[in-house]
Amino acid sequence: MADTALLTEREAAARLSVCERTLRKERQAGRLPYIRFGRAIRYAPADLETFIESARQCPSIAEQAPRSGGTRSLSPVVDFEAARAARRSARPKR
């Protein structure tokens, strides 16, 4: 028989290796299903497995490839010494 016992918040957090606060935030954001019995919150092990699978990330080949220049323009390279000299020459002489 599969593990069907409902887990407390502490047990579920331990199973996911996160703190209880993180688990609570995920539940309140609607990303983690839960069961409420009065004031008690419980989690089904199957829901935790589904949550883990939905959070799994596998970078695609496009994300791994180096980025090209694209259409975004780059800021020009500034010669700070030349800019400083230009500011000094633009100042009124004392």
Image (spheres, grey):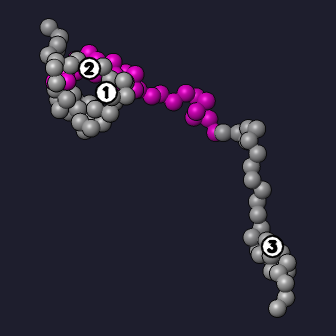
Assess whether mark 1 and mark 2 are in contact (beta carbons under 8 angstroms).
yes
Categorize mark 2 by other alpha carbons within 10 Å: few (<14), some (14-19), many (20+).
some
Instruction: Tell me which numbered mark, 2 or 1, is placed earlier along the sequence.
Output: 1
Specify the segment rendered in magenta: 40-66
Describe the element under mark 1 as helix, strand or loop: helix
Instruction: Say whether residue 83 is magenta.
Output: no
The residue carrying mark 2 is 34
Residue 74 image label:
none
Q: How many numbered marks does the figure carry? A: 3
Residue furthest toward the top?
1
Res 40 → quadrant: top left
Describe the element under mark 2 as helix, strand or loop: loop
On screen, residue 39 versus residue 67, left or right, reads: left
Q: Residue at x 14, y 16 (%)?
A: 5
Residue furthest toward the front?
38
Quarter of the rendering occupied by the N terminus: top left
Q: Which of marks 2 and 3 is in front?
A: 2
x and y percent of residue 62 in the render? Answer: 61, 30
Describe the element under mark 3 as helix, strand or loop: helix
